Image (spheres, rainbow, N blue to C red):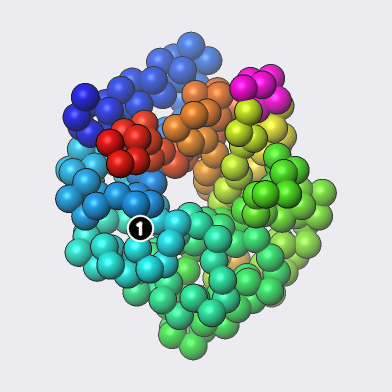
Amino acid sequence: MSIRDNILRVREDVERIKAQKGLSRSVALCAATKTRSLEEIKEVLAGGVDMVGENRIQEAREKYPHIPEAERHFIGHLQKNKIKYIFGLFSCIQSVDSIDLLRAIDLAAVKRGREMDLFFEINVSGEESKYGYDPDKAEELFEAAHECEIARVTGLMVMLPLTEDKGLVRKKAAQAYRLYERFRSWNDGKNISIEWLSMGMSQDYPIAVEEGSNLIRVGTALFGERGA
């Protein structure tokens, strides 16, 4: 199947799930572009995805200047010494996982006079191999966000457990949605304006959508297996 066909299939899956569950919300589709060629990225954009997301700064520096028309999100782990590259490449950082990183991004935004949307990455899976803030301490992130000058928190991002146990995946997705609903009440019209729950990848996006995700980050399901 072509990339365009794959996009249509994912969109149809989402609409089917919404119809079955009686859901009315829109679900944005982010194409995860790690290791993908510029040609593939242009093809997926032509196929109608809502945005693209990159995990690696170096790859983004090589590819994203060639697609200035696209909405571009950073979805990988961000080191503070790489913040300086973010502003010319991305409109949103989905993976803010510490107060130190939040403050460093805000300071960089102030220096440049550039707004930057942020998502807080929360580690609902509890897996040590995954980045993300402890969900039981997530209030700390939002309290720190109130003190920012420019940076604006517009969503939460989670990675669900990579397991065949669908019950566990669903449990963690439901936990993420509860956090999302909870912190939407913190919206202050300035630094916190929660709109997005970025949850669901190629292997688990149907469960994520069922449980409340409104933004899915999909790579393999759109592009095919890496190296194929």
Q: Position of residue 144 (x, y in %)?
A: 72, 69
Image quadrant in which the C terminus is located? top left
Residue 9 placement: quadrant:
top left
**Residue visible at 60% across and 62% down?**
96
Q: Is residue 227 magenta?
A: no
Residue 143 placement: quadrant:
bottom right
Q: Position of residue 46 (x, y in %)?
A: 17, 43
Q: Position of residue 44 (x, y in %)?
A: 24, 42
Q: Is residue 167 magenta?
A: yes
The secondary element bearing badge 1 is classed as: strand
Q: Is residue 203 left or right of residue 102?
A: left
Q: Position of residue 82 (x, y in %)?
A: 49, 76
Give the camera-side residue of 201 and 19: 201
Q: Is residue 96 above or below residue 79?
A: above
**Residue visible at 65% across and 54% down?**
131
**Residue visible at 34% across and 41% down?**
226
**Residue visible at 49% across and 61% down?**
93
The residue that disc 1 covers is 72
Span colored in magenta: 164-169
Tell me which amino acid carries mark 1: Arg
Q: Is residue 2 left or right of residue 112?
A: left
